[in-house]
């Protein structure tokens, strides 16, 4: 564990732009989070930020009772001082602090919480002039301290009041609260830092002549062929007979998910009549285009997504049908899909648990793993990053299910965290704080179904914030959007019209792809080499030198395993 406050020390960033020195005081972002409940919690992040008396060292200075709760100051056996809100007759009777918030800033919040009996969902809420804004939620326990991590932005600047509410009336214990503001510029500098550390590297290309001697003064053009960071979009069966759709898709994306075509209700709508023709053809198209496929899905845990014939099965019959489905679809696509969404949306829904018992999901994950030990087993669900209103899918709820399944699998099984990301209005500081919590699992995190509701006026702006945040979070390993095209319209977001001319969201996606790819030109030095910062990916290297009439063309892959390349110019 890193000491968070060390990272929070202000540092001075000097940017030299066009010969001008610009000084930016930038607070680095603290990505750490703790999702274990601890006996002795950790220090407040950023020394508490703008919170007064964040550790309750100075009694209750800065804090007041909210509603009609009574507030006490207590000292633990080990000497830690904290506050307790008690005699709470309704959820929001609690303890609070007044803060000044700025509408142009992004706020990251953290706090350590505990209750005196049982467990409770505790939420951090900020009362603003425009109403209440939820900033984070956690399950607090009586035996240990839990870290809440969240964030918010506000619509108008001015005084606000932060407090903690719970779904029970037990005591809430509070300590080490932090509210750290960031300017937009600082937030962007966090993105930039991650992009430089995680998505790019300094690559060296050494050009030699056929005799193996370094070739100085050669002109080198490095052109991107394919992004290294997985960036994809869903597709529908309409792509099979539509060359314009194929061309539009294949020239942009590295990864895909089939919207419906691999789902059980698509491959065995009628009991016993399996038909994989459409899914097979789509897989062939993807493979031919160099596009990797996320398998979606073996099962979907939503009652309303079941076929009539499945709903009617007895427990024993359903168990047989489930086994048959796994043995049919998983071997068929073994080695051809990189991920499986195994029992889709099993944080929200429990069709199979209801019918087959509480360990139904775990058994299904295990069976898929036994057939395809290399495929990454994803838990795919919504409202984990999108919004705080759906407490059933808060990060800690998702992680509870994730841990339960992981505990039932062999250590060798690979799991992944799939965050659907169907957004309305994004809360970007909350999204980042939620990703920080998922990152504590140390497994691949993908945004699997990104889209944004709404109209041209807001959609592209929100989509940009979401995609940049995902691309720039150190723990996110891939992004797939949920904008498959159909002549009757898309699920919620179409990138193009029916002639594959971009809508504003399509233009945004294209400009991000362009930004995330790098293109360089230069001349080799005396030692025959050229060095440059390149995004991970596949490149074409074209070399021109007076020693030959024709350029030579080479292909290289730039990733953390290979940043030095030698090419021979003929
Ligand atoms: C708060 O942080 C202090 C160190 O600054 C630590 O000693 C204390 O245990 C923490 N308290 C809680 C409840 O996390
Ligand atoms: C409050 O939340 C906890 C933790 O999720 C849950 O176990 C409990 O049943 C909830 N209590 C009420 C009264 O809703
Ligand atoms: C972006 O980050 C890199 C590495 O952290 C740094 O060298 C560069 O100056 C930054 N650029 C901007 C515009 O912040
Ligand atoms: C296409 O299929 C071949 C043969 O199965 C495989 O080696 C290759 O990795 C696939 N390509 C992609 C992009 O999935
Ligand atoms: C190399 O590039 C320079 C500048 O762009 C150009 O003048 C020169 O002709 C090029 N040489 C070759 C061999 O292509
Ligand atoms: Ca304390």
Image: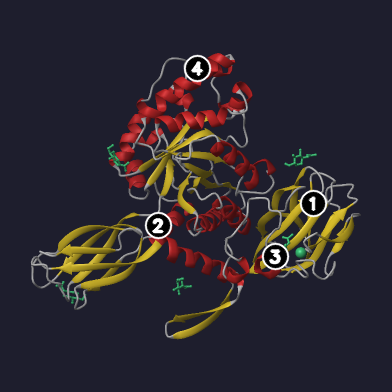
Q: Is residue 229 above or below residue 316?
A: below
Secondary structure state at the residue bearing disc 2: helix
The picture quadrant where one finds residue 74 is: bottom right
**Which residue carries the number 3 mark?**
179
The picture places residue 263, in percent across and down from the top left corner, at 47, 29
> Which of label 2 and label 1 is nearer to you?
1
Left or right, residue 528 beside residue 416: left
Out of 567 and 53, give the one closest to the viewer: 53
Please tell me which of labels 4 and 2 falls first in the chain: 4
Asked whether residue 453 is in view, the answer is: no
Secondary structure state at the residue bearing disc 3: strand
Q: Residues within 10 Å of mark 1 (few under 14, many from 20)?
A: many
Q: Tell me the quarter of the image containing the N terminus.
A: bottom right
**Which residue carries the number 2 mark?**
513
Disc ID at residue 165 = 1
Left or right, residue 65 beside residue 129: right
The picture places residue 541, in percent across and down from the top left corner, at 22, 62
The picture quadrant where one finds residue 531 is: bottom left
Please tell me which of labels 1 and 4 falls first in the chain: 1
Q: Residue at x 69, y 46 (%)?
A: 389
Marks 4 and 3: CB-CB under 8 Å?
Answer: no
């Amino acid at each position: 564990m890193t000491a968070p406050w060390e990272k929070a020390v202000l540092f001075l960033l000097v940017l030299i732009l066009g010969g001008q020195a610009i000084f930016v005081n930038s607070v680095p972002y603290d990505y750490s989070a703790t999702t274990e409940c601890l006996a002795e919690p950790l220090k407040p992040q950023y020394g508490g930020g703008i919170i007064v008396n964040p550790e309750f060292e100075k009694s209750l200075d800065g804090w007041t009772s909210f509603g009609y709760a009574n507030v006490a100051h207590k000292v633990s056996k080990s000497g830690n001082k904290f506050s307790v809100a008690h005699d709470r007759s309704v959820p929001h009777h609690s303890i609070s602090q007044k803060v000044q918030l700025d509408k142009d800033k992004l706020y990251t919040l953290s706090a350590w919480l505990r209750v005196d009996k049982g467990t409770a969902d505790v939420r951090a809420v900020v009362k603003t002039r425009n109403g209440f804004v939820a900033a984070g939620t956690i399950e607090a326990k009586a035996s240990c301290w839990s870290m809440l991590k969240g964030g918010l932005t506000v619509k108008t600047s001015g005084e606000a009041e932060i407090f903690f509410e719970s779904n029970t009336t037990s005591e809430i214990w509070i300590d080490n609260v932090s509210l750290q503001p960031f300017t937009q510029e600082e937030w962007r500098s966090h993105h930039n830092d991650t992009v430089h550390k995680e998505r790019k590297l300094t690559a060296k290309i050494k050009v030699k002549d056929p005799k193996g001697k370094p070739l100085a003064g050669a002109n080198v053009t490095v052109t991107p062929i394919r992004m290294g960071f997985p960036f994809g979009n869903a597709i529908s069966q309409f792509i099979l007979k539509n060359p314009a759709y194929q061309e539009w898709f294949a020239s942009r994306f590295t990864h895909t998910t089939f919207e419906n075509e691999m789902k059980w209700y698509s491959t065995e709508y009628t009991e016993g009549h399996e038909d994989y023709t459409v899914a097979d053809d789509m897989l062939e198209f993807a493979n031919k285009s160099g596009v990797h496929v996320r398998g979606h899905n073996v099962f979907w845990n939503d009652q309303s997504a079941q076929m009539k014939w499945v709903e009617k099965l007895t427990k024993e019959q359903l168990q047989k049908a489930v086994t048959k489905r796994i043995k049919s679809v998983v071997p068929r696509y073994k080695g051809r899909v990189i991920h499986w969404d195994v029992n889709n949306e099993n944080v929200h829904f429990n069709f199979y648990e209801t019918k087959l018992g509480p360990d139904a999901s775990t058994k299904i994950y295990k069976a898929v793993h036994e057939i395809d030990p290399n495929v990454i087993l994803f838990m795919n669900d919504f409202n984990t990053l999108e919004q705080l209103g759906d407490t059933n899918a808060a990060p800690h709820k998702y992680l509870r299910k994730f841990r339960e399944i992981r505990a039932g699998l062999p250590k060798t099984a690979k799991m992944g965290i799939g965050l659907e990301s169907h957004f309305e209005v994004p809360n970007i500081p909350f999204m980042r704080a939620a990703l920080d919590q998922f990152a504590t699992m140390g497994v691949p995190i993908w945004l699997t179904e990104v889209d944004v509701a709404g109209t041209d006026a807001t959609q592209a702006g929100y989509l940009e914030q979401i995609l940049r945040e995902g691309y720039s979070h150190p723990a996110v390993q891939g992004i797939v959007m949920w904008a498959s095209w159909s002549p009757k319209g898309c699920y919620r977001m179409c990138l193009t019209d029916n002639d594959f001319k971009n809508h504003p969201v399509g233009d945004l996606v294209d400009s991000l792809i362009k930004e995330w790819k790098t293109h360089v030109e230069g001349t080799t030095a005396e030692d025959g080499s050229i060095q440059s910062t390149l995004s991970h990916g596949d490149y074409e290297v074209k070399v021109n030198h007076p020693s030959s009439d024709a350029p030579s063309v080479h292909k290289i892959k730039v990733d953390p395993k290979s940043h030095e390349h030698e090419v021979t110019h003929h």
